[in-house]
């Protein structure tokens, strides 16, 4: 970042602090100390780098040579060129060690020392300079390797002994830096906003009024931290993939909504809900703005009771979490409360509305936590689980010997179990850093089993249900990618790099516009740094797609969904049953998906698990002398009425969709086998569309709202008085 940019940031930050504290903006000493603090680090570190401790650096030598031969202007131009490429490494004041020392110093003087306001301003801008330099490095490169050179090389190996040890270290360090800067800023603001009395800061920091704000400040810090990490993860991902930034077709919320041609029917509302689910940022913004505006409007009307402050965010969190998405409910509600407080502060400074007192911070914290929890749990309970898509394969196996001994079925079940486990292990090794488990498979508990004493036990239901699960935390995977994917982590013992969660929004079109493209039998991730090819299924297309193919794209709202998803499971059911038309043939139907608390969908990762299982299963069957593979098919099945990940895909392919038949790529016999296997699954509690069960949801929400309203003592007292008057 250039010198004049640092100066502008330092002066702007100082002016903002003065404005918020109602301090005169004309005090020149504030700006002078802010400017000195913001520029001091460069005026110390860069001259020492070139003249003292790194004189033998090849770029430093080249700079001196250009200075002698071509003059100062050419040397400065060369320095600018090298600096823009971040080639100067090893700066003493531009590293995480120096950053940690400054953060500790800022924290200590903020909490325990009586310091001049001008010195505090200088420390603020000095600290801010380091943070903006890290931001500039990350914006340009997608990492901050130049700040990590002071760390010992054995740290990654040591912390990698635990499953997410390196990530925990990175998060703790980053959060400590954020909290230190926040406390320093609060201390500076408090000292600016009140007359300087001896050790006054002690009484402010440890007063009951301020301590009641601490939980609310922690919550705000957490959400700001998550927001920064989300923006960083999206920016890093966009830098890594070869993507046309002008391509937004199919991901614009208002695309194809022509309000003059709207028919207010169920299909229209279904499409609106799908679009809101696909664009969760819009839902979060609407929810947050509603909460902020309603709470401040109630303040203007003098109706901002404690009950209203708690109840309104909870109402809206339940509503948005139920009808749109749990992420919208839990995130939008908390963001709305934080936004409401900021809006109240700004409007109160302008004399438009009363300022909320600090003792209400605990109330706002309770409202935010309650809305957060209910936005998540209420959405899960009321929305039910949505089955959006499945990765499905059908393998039909026959017994070559055609004997009457049923031992060949037992051997086939053993092969299926081993293939399921090996496939999950192979897929896990390809996608995840930490090692796979020894066993992923399990037998679903049957309803009944016959045990004839003279032969093998028999499933009474005439089918066997195997399943496998591999669970991970999406937030951790995204954070490992943004914080741990750098040169420093290359010293970790694992071979698999830190991959982000692969894109989930699907479309069909030109290969140049997608983040991930399907070519023949694989999905290729278009990364400029890392190679990832996920196995898929198929061969040369049977029809001409005119150069177009299946694509995936990762918008920003997918990052937010991942960061607020607590757990995700790659799940596969393997249903094995006999063919009704041929008693010498066994059908194996595998159904893979990725499952969260509210949805189930076939991601490219889930498809990779399914294909690994299918390929290993086919290899083992082909090697067995008694088995013959009659047929095998694979397809991805999605449900357009519920899958917002496939909205754009359906618009692209619906003109070429045909009826099922024996000549189709996934023939009608395979579809019948899939439907039979799907019916045998134990869990059938899935909704068919986003607008399903709206009446039930409204009724349950209404009951919850009535209970919540009646829980308020003031309202109960009012109703008793009203009924008493009506009775007389």
Image (cartoon, helix red, strand yellow):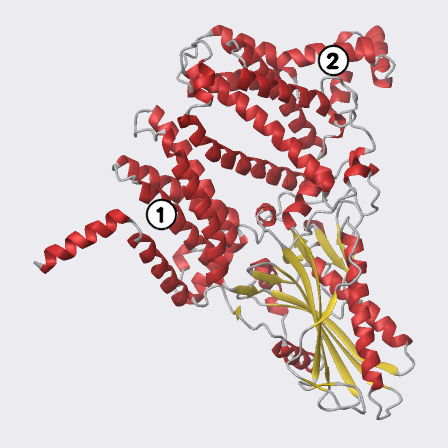
Q: Residue at x 86, y 76 (%)?
A: 621
Residue 39, placed above or below residue 460: above
Image coordinates of residue 481 in percent, x first then y, are 71, 42
Q: Which residue is mark 1?
A: 311
Q: Residue at x 45, y 8 (%)?
A: 27
Q: Residue at x 76, y 53 (%)?
A: 431
Q: Which residue is mark 2?
A: 46
Q: Can I make out residue 367 in this image? A: yes
In this picture, residue 638 sits left or right of residue 317: right
Quadrant of the snapshot with the C terminus: bottom left
Q: Can I make out residue 95 in this image? A: no
Dividing the picture into quarters, in which one does residue 591 lie? bottom right
Image coordinates of residue 393 in percent, x first then y, are 73, 72
Crowding at mark 1 (Cα within 10 Å: few <14, some 14-19, many 20+): some
**Which of the two discs, 2 and 1, labels the residue nearer the N terminus?**
2
Question: Which residue occupies the foreground of this view, 520 or 54?
Answer: 54
Image coordinates of residue 446 in percent, x first then y, are 66, 79
């Amino acid at each position: 970042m250039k010198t004049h940019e640092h100066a502008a940031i330092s002066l702007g930050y100082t002016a903002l602090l003065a404005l918020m504290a109602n301090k005169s903006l004309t005090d020149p000493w504030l700006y002078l100390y802010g400017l000195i603090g913001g520029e001091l680090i460069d005026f110390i570190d860069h001259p020492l780098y070139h003249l003292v401790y790194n004189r033998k650096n090849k770029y430093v030598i080249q700079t001196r040579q250009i200075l002698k031969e071509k003059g100062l202007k050419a040397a400065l131009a060369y320095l600018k060129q090298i600096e823009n490429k971040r080639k100067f490494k090893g700066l003493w004041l531009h590293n995480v060690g120096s950053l940690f020392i400054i953060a500790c110093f800022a924290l200590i003087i903020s909490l325990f020392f009586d310091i001049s306001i001008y010195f505090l301003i200088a420390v603020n801008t000095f600290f801010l300079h380091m943070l903006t330099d890290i931001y500039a490095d990350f914006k340009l490169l997608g990492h901050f390797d130049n700040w990590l050179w002071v760390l010992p090389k054995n740290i990654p190996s040591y912390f990698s002994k635990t499953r997410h040890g390196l990530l925990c270290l990175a998060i703790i360090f980053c959060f400590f830096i954020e909290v230190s800067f926040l406390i320093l800023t609060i201390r500076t603001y408090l000292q600016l906003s009140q007359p300087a009395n001896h050790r006054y800061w002690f009484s402010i920091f440890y007063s009951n009024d301020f301590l009641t704000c601490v939980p609310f400040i922690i919550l705000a810090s957490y959400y700001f931290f998550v927001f920064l990490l989300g923006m960083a993860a999206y920016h890093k991902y966009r830098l890594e993939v070869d993507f046309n930034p002008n391509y937004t077709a199919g991901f614009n919320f208002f695309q194809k909504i022509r309000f003059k041609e709207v028919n207010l029917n169920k299909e229209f509302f279904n499409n609106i809900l799908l679009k809101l689910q696909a664009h969760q940022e819009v839902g979060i913004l609407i929810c947050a703005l509603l909460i902020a505006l309603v709470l401040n409007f109630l303040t203007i009307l003098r109706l901002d009771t404690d009950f209203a402050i708690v109840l309104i965010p909870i109402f809206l969190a339940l509503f948005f979490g139920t009808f749109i998405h749990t992420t919208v409910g839990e995130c939008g509600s908390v963001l709305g409360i934080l936004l409401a407080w900021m809006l109240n502060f700004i409007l109160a400074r302008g004399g438009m509305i009363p300022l909320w007192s600090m003792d209400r911070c605990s109330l706002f914290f309770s409202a935010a936590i309650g809305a957060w929890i209910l936005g998540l749990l209420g959405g899960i309970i009321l929305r039910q689980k949505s089955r959006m898509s499945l990765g499905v394969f059908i393998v039909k196996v026959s017994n070559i010997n055609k004997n009457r001994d049923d031992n060949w079925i037992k051997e086939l079940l053993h092969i299926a179990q081993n293939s399921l486990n090996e496939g999950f292990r192979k897929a896990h090794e390809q996608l995840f850093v930490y090692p796979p488990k020894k066993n992923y498979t399990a037998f679903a508990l049957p309803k009944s089993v016959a045990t004839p004493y003279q032969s093998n036990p028999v499933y009474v239901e005439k089918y066997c249900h195997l399943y496998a699960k591999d669970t991970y935390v999406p937030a951790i995977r995204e954070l490992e990618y943004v914080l741990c994917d750098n040169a420093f982590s290359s010293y970790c013992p694992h071979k698999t790099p830190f991959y982000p969660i692969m894109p989930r929004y699907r479309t069909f079109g030109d290969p140049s516009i997608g983040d991930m493209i399907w070519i023949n039998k694989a999905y290729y991730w278009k990364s400029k740094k890392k190679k990832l090819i996920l196995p898929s299924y198929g061969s040369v297309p049977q029809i001409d797609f005119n150069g177009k193919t299946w694509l995936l794209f990762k918008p920003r709202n997918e990052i937010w969904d991942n960061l607020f998803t607590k757990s995700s499971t790659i799940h596969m059911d393997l249903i094995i049953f006999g063919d009704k038309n041929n008693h010498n043939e066994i059908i194996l139907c595998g159904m893979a998906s990725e499952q969260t608390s509210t949805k189930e969908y076939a991601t490219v990762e889930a498809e990779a698990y399914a294909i690994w299982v299918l390929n290993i299963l086919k290899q083992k069957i082909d090697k067995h002398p008694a088995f013959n593979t009659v047929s095998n098919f694979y397809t991805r099945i999605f449900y357009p009425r519920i899958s917002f990940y496939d909205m754009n895909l359906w618009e692209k392919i619906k003109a070429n969709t045909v009826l099922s038949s024996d000549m189709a790529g996934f023939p009608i016999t395979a579809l019948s086998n899939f439907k039979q296997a799907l019916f045998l699954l134990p869990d059938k509690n899935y909704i068919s569309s986003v607008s399903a069960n709206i009446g039930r949801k409204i009724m349950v929400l209404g009951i919850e709202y009535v209970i919540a309203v009646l829980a308020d003592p003031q309202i109960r007292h009012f109703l008793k008085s009203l009924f008493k008057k009506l009775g007389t």
